[in-house]
Image (cartoon, helix red, strand yellow):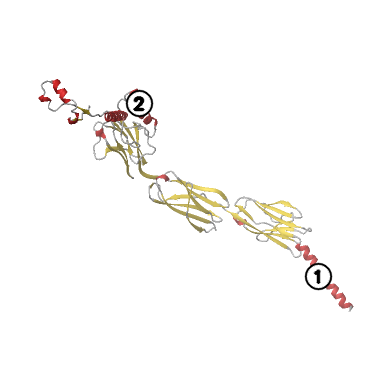
């Protein structure tokens, strides 16, 4: 019984001591962090212990060689320097990091059993300057072009993005691993250009952990056929007989048009018209000059034109001075003048496709026509009123009159006898109606 009791006690003691030792080990937590560093810069390795009981901390390189044992450096590499040593931390710096320094470093804590934590050092190698190349240096409007951008010798592989102005383009990347374990990335992009793309930058943006905002750019050169616009220099309002007309043809293209031509559609330009470069000048307009005038400009990419429709109105006449007897006419003139929509010289709100000297105007009319119409209206109205008054007057003064002539007066000896014989003879007299007009 005694032997059995002592054996059980020894077993309990052993288990208690083992559990206490295990708790002691577990309570000492050894931690570290992975490190990413750009080639040539400095890396920091930190071995940290929680609740250390004076156990020894040391740092080993990927070849399991001791770099630091507590605060002593057995490894003869001056690039390793002690930054901090305490019972809870061993911190070491590695300067001028190279690709050969990459690997797994070991933080070791001398406990029973020993604890280890691993810090992986990753060496980042930025790519060289990106190289952007274009299939075509000079482009024509509507054509498709292709560009490539290359980021060489990086670790890890870079990513490439494309921008055209402020719009992102989608490229097709290709990654190659070189003999020295570096990566070369090439991205290709294709797109169609138009005249608005002339001078727009195409930007190749390289994204890599070792660099920020690494980019190359190339400006587009796009050629396009001319853009033509006719500008009316004079007159600013309607074109009337006797006035002058001056038009300017503005042509823009790439390459720039060297010459512009003026012509009249379906007819000849007036013989006395003066053409100087892009300017057309016609003096003393008349209605025989009506028609469509066209400015044509061309360059190696094509030809473009713009039209101006000329319509010559009658020359303005002098407006008669309104009198008190013509109040209605005066009212018509003031109303027409105060209404901006009826004003003939008001410029149109929108420009037609072809410039038209009639643009924004209604039927041609002048002030003298309005005056004449007003006078005629007043005269007709006065005549109608007069006829109505006379008609009513004549209707009220219509009457019936009788004559009393005796029948047989021709047989009387004299007039007195005829009158005497006619007394009382009204019944036989003829009734005659007489009207006075």
Q: Name the residue under label 1.
A: 15
Camera-nearest label, 1 or 2? 2
Q: Where is residue 280 in the image (x, y as percent from the top left)?
A: 30, 33
Q: Can residue 283 be seen in this view?
A: no
SS under mark 1: helix
Dot 2: within a 10 Å radius of its alpha carbon, few (fewer than 14), some, or many (20 or more) residues?
A: few
- In the image, residue 340 lies at what x, y percent? 39, 33
Left or right: 432, with 209 as reference point: left
Residue sitting at x 79%, y 67% = 19
| In the foreground, 410 or 223 | 410
Residue reaching furthest to the bottom: 1
Determine the image quadrant of residue 224. Answer: top left
Q: Name the residue under label 2.
A: 327
The answer to which of 281 and 238 lies nearer the viewer is: 238
Q: Quadrant of residue 395?
A: top left
The secondary structure type at the circle numbered 2 is helix
Query: Along the line of sight, which residue is nearer the eye, 415 or 246?
Result: 415
Q: Is residue 408 among what the camera can see?
A: yes
Distance of label 1 from label 2 (alpha carbons): 130 Å
């Amino acid at each position: 019984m005694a032997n059995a009791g002592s054996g059980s006690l020894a077993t309990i003691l052993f288990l208690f001591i083992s559990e206490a030792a295990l708790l002691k080990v577990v309570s000492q937590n050894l931690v570290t962090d992975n490190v990413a560093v750009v080639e040539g810069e400095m890396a920091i390795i930190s071995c940290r212990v929680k609740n250390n009981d004076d156990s020894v901390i040391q740092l080993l390189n990927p070849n399991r060689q001791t770099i630091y044992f507590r605060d002593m450096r057995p490894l003869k590499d001056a690039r390793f320097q002690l930054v901090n040593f305490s019972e809870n931390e061993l911190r070491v710096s590695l300067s001028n990091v190279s690709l050969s320094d990459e690997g797994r470093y070991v933080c070791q804590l001398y406990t029973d059993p020993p604890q280890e934590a691993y810090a992986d050092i990753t060496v980042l190698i930025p790519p060289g300057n990106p190289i952007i190349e274009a299939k075509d240096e000079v482009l024509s409007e509507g054509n498709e072009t292709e560009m490539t951008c290359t980021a060489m010798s990086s670790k890890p592989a870079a990513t490439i993005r494309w921008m055209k102005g402020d719009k992102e383009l989608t490229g097709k990347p290709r990654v190659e691993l070189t003999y020295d374990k570096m990566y070369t990335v090439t991205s290709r992009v294709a797109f169609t250009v138009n005249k608005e793309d002339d001078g727009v930058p195409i930007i190749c943006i390289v994204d890599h952990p070792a660099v920020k905002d690494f980019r190359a750019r190339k400006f587009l050169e796009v050629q396009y056929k001319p853009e033509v616009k006719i500008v009316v220099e004079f007159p600013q309002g309607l074109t009337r007989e006797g006035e002058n007309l001056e038009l300017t043809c503005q042509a823009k293209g790439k390459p720039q048009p060297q010459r512009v031509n003026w012509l009249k559609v379906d007819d000849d330009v007036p013989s006395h018209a003066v053409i100087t470069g892009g300017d057309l000048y016609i003096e003393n307009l008349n209605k025989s000059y009506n028609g469509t005038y066209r400015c044509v400009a061309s360059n190696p990419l094509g030809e473009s034109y713009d039209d101006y429709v000329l319509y010559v109105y009658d020359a303005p006449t002098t407006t008669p001075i309104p009198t008190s007897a013509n109040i209605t006419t005066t009212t018509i003139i003031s109303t027409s003048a105060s209404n901006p929509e009826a004003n003939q010289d008001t410029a149109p709100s929108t420009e037609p496709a072809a410039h038209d000297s009639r643009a924004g105007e209604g039927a041609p009319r002048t002030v003298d026509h309005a005056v004449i119409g007003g006078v005629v209206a007043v005269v007709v109205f006065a005549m109608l009123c007069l006829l109505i008054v006379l008609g009513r007057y004549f209707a009220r003064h219509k009457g019936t009159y009788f004559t009393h002539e005796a029948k047989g007066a021709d047989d009387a000896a004299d007039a007195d006898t005829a009158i005497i014989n006619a007394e009382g003879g009204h019944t036989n007299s003829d009734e005659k109606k007489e009207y006075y007009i």
